[in-house]
Image (cartoon, rainbow, N blue to C red):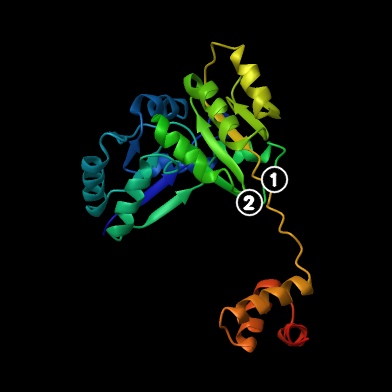
């Protein structure tokens, strides 16, 4: 009988955020697939867990996936973890879950902390709709294309960023998004946790004066303002009907078309167009 894959969330900083269920699962699986075995070993030692570790990262995904799946098919249970937070989110574990799904292997999630959702919750920005964008590419062209593709998105945007790229990323965001509100969450749940709420231009100025920064960042950015559509009057709608008719469309079809676009009744438009 095949084993199972357990997707296990681990703390993003504070080890006290580890759940009882996550600890128990790590104790019961047969082996653990880890993004960085050195980081995971520290976590396991803290909770006195001794299990075989299998290296699973972006440079070993294909070979490692095949090996892990063979072990699971032989009856072993595997727990997959990342260095911090929920594995498989902007993380090589995503490919392992896909491979298990394609092989008919059961995947069970053990929920844990998430830097993206935690930062969103305390951002002070809208949380009703959001888009997780992960890390921007190191390629300048791809970064600009990515930012350009989401600049009109009205949802709150969530990005991850490394300290050495932060200032450049903020400058690019100011160029593409304009001066929106931003919440910058730094080292969440750790000793030097910091949450800054400001505008993007203020953030550029602030970090221009801080040449040496460490730790990971989550950037929560206000979505684009919805475009306000000009109000259409029934006279405007009637003129649109007449324009379609002049172009060769039947009056009833033109009224039906414009009624769909404007919300006015087809009969109202028909009467107006005949006047």
Q: Quadrant of the C terminus?
A: bottom right
Residue 197 percent across, percent down from the top left: 70, 29
Query: Where is mark 1, residue-wise?
Result: 126
Residue 54 percent across, percent down from the top left: 28, 35
Q: In the figure, residue 118 lies in which quadrant?
A: top right
Q: Quadrant of the N terminus?
A: bottom left
Q: Is residue 186 above or below residue 70?
A: above
- Cα distance between the residues tagged 2 and 1: 7 Å
Q: In the figure, residue 123 lies in which quadrant?
A: top right
Residue at 33%, 34% (x, y): give it.
51
Tag shown at residue 129: 2
How many numbered marks, from 0 up?
Answer: 2
Q: In the figure, residue 254 lies in which quadrant?
A: bottom right
Q: Is residue 233 above or below residue 80?
A: below
Please indicate, yes or no, whether residue 14 appears anywhere in the rendered image.
no
Q: Is residue 258 above or below residue 68?
A: below
Tag shown at residue 272: none
Q: Are marks 2 and 1 in contact (CB under 8 Å)?
A: yes
Q: Is 112 positioned to the left or the right of 198 in the image?
A: left
Q: Is 137 positioned to the left or the right of 190 in the image?
A: left
Q: Secondary structure at mark 1?
A: loop
Q: Secondary structure at mark 2?
A: loop
Residue 200 percent across, percent down from the top left: 65, 29
Q: Is 18 positioned to the left or the right of 94 in the image?
A: right
Residue at 67%, 74% (x, y): give it.
240
Please indicate, yes or no, whether residue 108 appears anywhere in the rendered image.
yes
> Closer to the camera, 263 or 153?
263
Q: Residues within 10 Å of mark 1 (few under 14, many from 20)?
A: some
Q: Is 76 positioned to the left or the right of 44 in the image?
A: left
Residue 43 percent across, percent down from the top left: 44, 28
């Amino acid at each position: 009988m095949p084993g199972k894959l357990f997707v296990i969330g681990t703390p993003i900083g504070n080890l006290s955020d580890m759940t009882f269920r996550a600890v128990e699962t790590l104790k019961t699986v047969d082996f653990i697939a880890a993004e960085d075995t050195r980081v995971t070993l520290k976590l396991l030692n803290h909770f006195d867990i001794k299990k075989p570790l299998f290296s699973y990262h972006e440079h070993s995904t294909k070979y490692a996936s095949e090996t892990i799946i063979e072990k699971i098919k032989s009856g072993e249970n595997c727990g997959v973890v990342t260095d911090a937070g929920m594995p498989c989110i902007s993380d090589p574990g995503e490919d392992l879950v896909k491979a298990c799904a394609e092989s008919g292997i059961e995947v069970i999630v053990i929920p844990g902390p998430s830097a993206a959702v935690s930062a969103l919750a305390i951002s002070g920005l809208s949380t009703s709709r959001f888009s997780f964008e992960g890390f921007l590419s190191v390629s300048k062209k791809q970064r600009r294309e990515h930012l350009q593709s989401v600049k009109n998105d009205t949802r709150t945007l969530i990005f991850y960023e490394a300290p050495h790229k932060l200032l450049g990323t903020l400058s690019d965001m100011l160029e593409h998004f304009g001066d929106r509100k931003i919440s910058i969450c730094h080292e969440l749940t750790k000793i030097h946790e910091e949450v800054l709420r400001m505008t993007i231009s203020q953030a550029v100025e602030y970090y221009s004066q801080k040449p040496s920064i460490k730790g990971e960042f989550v950037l929560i950015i206000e979505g684009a303002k919805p475009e306000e559509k000009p109000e259409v009057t029934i006279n405007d709608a009637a003129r649109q009907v007449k324009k379609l008719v002049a172009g060769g469309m039947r009056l009833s079809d033109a009224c039906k078309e414009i009624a769909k676009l404007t919300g006015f009744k087809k009969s109202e438009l028909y009467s107006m167009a005949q006047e």
